[in-house]
Image (tube, rainbow, N blue to C red):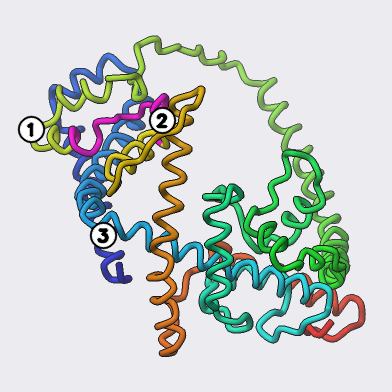
Amino acid sequence: MNPQEEKEKAIWKQQKLIEFKQELKNNAIFLSYLEKTPPHARERFIDEYASDKVNWLDWGPQHVAWNDAEDLQWVELATKGLKEIQQKKLFDAQCLWRAEKLDIKEINIGFDFYYWEDNIFNCSFIEPINQDEVEMYLRYLLSDNYEAGHGFFFRWQNYAERKKEYNDESEMASFPEWYDFHNGQTGLSIYMEFPDIKGDKEAFYYKLWVAERVKNDKKKKVEAEVQKVEQQKVAETQAASSDAAAPQIDVDRRPHLDYFEDGWMTWFVKTFEDKQTQDIFDRYGGEERNFDFDEFLDKDLDILCKADKLIPIEAWFDWKEAVHKIADKFRREKIAEAMPFAYKQYRVSIDLNLGFEEVQPLFRMEDWGWQYEAILHGRELNGEPRDYDF
């Protein structure tokens, strides 16, 4: 979706959100029902319900489109695997850079590696993927070591976290399986033993910057505390001289709108919505908000049902776990089948110098610019030039 389409979609969603809220507020039957509920719960319910209704309209048709092109998911996952190949190479480069064994003109401070993590295919200072690396990743993909995914906050280039995990010998350590597999194949685990010279220098400059901020802010903090005490005295004096009685708290004991009760949403839609909305809800929102629903099991069963071959399920003490295991195996096989095509697409962009779309980093540089300023100012405080040549 291009920027113009994204803008139009955002406007459409906002307009629909306002429209659906107004519909509820103008629904006489619904309003009579609301009289039985506390006022503070009404607006919250209207907001949440209208938002859900927009999502049914927005995502429902896309669900049909995804089913029509479900084979593309394997190519996308294979492309994700190609990116993991480059993430390991970028992390190795970071280890060398931090140990001052490699100069990288595109890197000023360690934080810059996050930008290249998010734009890994555009990273110019690591070599493009070759066939041998693809073969290595395929061995990893089809091994018992394969790790399907990571949490939302996981960062491939988070040096401090990866180093901590690597040095943690407990069973809870979560050093990326791909990094570990790659190191076992290449012997590059030695990079994890290199010192973090650059990181130590950055920490030194950062501490100087923090110390100055603490010193400059100390006076303001004291003044603020004095003002706070004076305001408290005034407030206590006013309270003591006031003859007004304390307001009585009237507890509203009317029943709340139980948005998460099993079956409640279905009842609400069937009671207050028109036939078209009821049909949309049945197709795209019928699962309601069932927190007992096993999303992963549902996805695994869906994938196995749509498989292009018979898949025997191995005996296991828990049938759900057996489904997860065979579905995971099937996924990895399908990704492996799609890998040659994904690699061919990648090579076309590389060989024809077409480039790849730039991704907006998860950590935006403009939001984290203080890190750069902190290090530059720290160098000034230490009598050094205001640059990154350290």
For residue 203, the mark is none
Q: Label 2: how many residues lie within 10 Å, few (<14), some (14-19) or many (20+)?
A: few
Residue 86, percent from left and from top: 58, 71
Residue 21 visible: no
Q: How far apart are labels 2 and 3 at the CA level?
A: 31 Å
Q: Amino acid at mark 2?
A: Asp
Extreme residue toward the top, this view: 253
Q: Secondary structure at mark 1?
A: helix
The front one of 187 and 348 is 187
The residue sitting at 24% across, 42% down in the picture is: 56
The residue sitting at 44% across, 25% down in the picture is: 319
Q: Is residue 368 left or right of residue 40?
A: right
For residue 294, the mark is 2
- Circle 3 residue: 9
Which image quarter holds the C terminus? bottom right
Q: Secondary structure at mark 2?
A: loop
Please report the bounds of the magenta region as a residue range. 281-295
